[in-house]
Amino acid sequence: MKDSLKPPSFAKHPCGTAASVPIAQGRTAEIYPWDNGQILKLFRDWCPSDWVDYEARIARAVYEAGVPSPAVGEIVEVRGRRGLVYERLDGVSMLQELNARPWTVLKHARSLAELQVQIHRQSIAGLPTYEDRLRHDIRNTAHLGEELRDQALARLDVLPKGQSLCHGDHHPGNILITKRGPVVIDWMNACSGRLWADVARTSMTLTIGAKAAGDQIRPIVRVMAKLYHRTYLNRYRRLVPDTENEMDRWLPIIAAARLNEDIHPEREALLRMVKEEI
């Protein structure tokens, strides 16, 4: 990640000890070693406080439902920043594994689909709906004109609704390859909704997102991206047939909503999809 805040120096905390250098980091949080074989996901100071509470609640519910995910500990505060303690899992992300061993592309593409099917078979009460989240993002993006915005919202209103547990950001970077098997992490975007909306989001990440990923993906893996994407979709559709070709109907809606994330390298392709397919 290019996101670089200077890591704080941590003193002894009553609930554990954090090292001063993160072992991983992303846009919203840094990951630090913690006591007793755990890790601390320490949210950036700009993140709203309730994000941590929300992720803790979702992560516990997902773990208790039997989805392969890390066990969740307590919420702690370190130097004014809130964080969530998780069990520490030894392994690398599926994306890292693909970069290191590109010949595993078919195996991991099928695994990505099988994990998503397992997630979609669950339903957890009290989650925000996928439809409401998409509606919010479409209304708030600065990159859609009024006509396109209205068309996208009208299309969203008539698409089928659902109650499946959806990860909301299911891609190889959010799968850890561990000794106990693949484990799904980062449940911040979890919601309840139509499973084909979630599949469309993954499909878009594997196509438009992969093209914009820059040096996160080795050239040889970039060449194999189409094979990975096709294998993933074929495996998912074999397990859950898309008899109404529903995923394609969700794609321009997901693209319109994703514009609100303001990922500059993706913007042109997302806009083109919205304009051509809505």
Image (cartoon, rainbow, N blue to C red):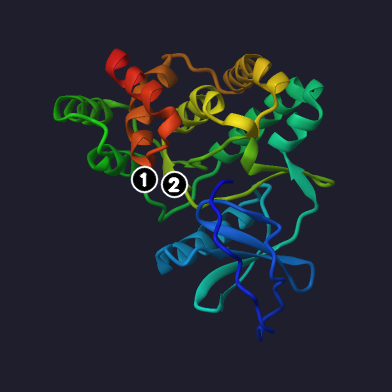
Marks 1 and 2: in contact by CB < 8 Å? Answer: yes
From mark 2 to mark 1, how far is it between C-alphas? 5 Å
Q: Secondary structure at mark 2?
A: strand
The quadrant in which residue 10 appears is bottom right
Residue 265 screen position, x and y as percent: 45, 30
Q: Is residue 120 left or right of residue 151?
A: right
- Given the current orientation, which residue lies at the most extreme left position? 146
Camera-side residue of 72 and 174: 174
The quadrant in which residue 33 appears is bottom right
What residue is disc 1 on?
A: 129
Q: Is residue 112 left or right of residue 80?
A: right
Identify the residue at horizontal 39%, vertical 36% (top origin). Answer: 162
Identify the residue at horizontal 25%, vertical 25% (top origin). Answer: 155
Dot 2 or dot 1: first in sequence order is: 1
Q: Which three-letter amino acid code belongs to the residue tagged 2?
A: Cys
Q: Is residue 160 visible?
A: yes
Q: Is residue 250 visible?
A: no
Q: Please rate how many residues cluster around mark 2, counting C-alpha atoms within 10 Å: few if below 14, some from 14 to 19, many from 20.
A: many
Q: Please rate how many residues cluster around mark 1, counting C-alpha atoms within 10 Å: few if below 14, some from 14 to 19, many from 20.
A: many
What residue is disc 2 on?
A: 191
Q: Which mark is residue 36?
A: none
Q: Secondary structure at mark 1?
A: loop
| Above or below, comparing residue 165 to residue 108 in the picture | below
Camera-side residue of 166 and 126: 166
Q: Is residue 25 left or right of residue 36?
A: left
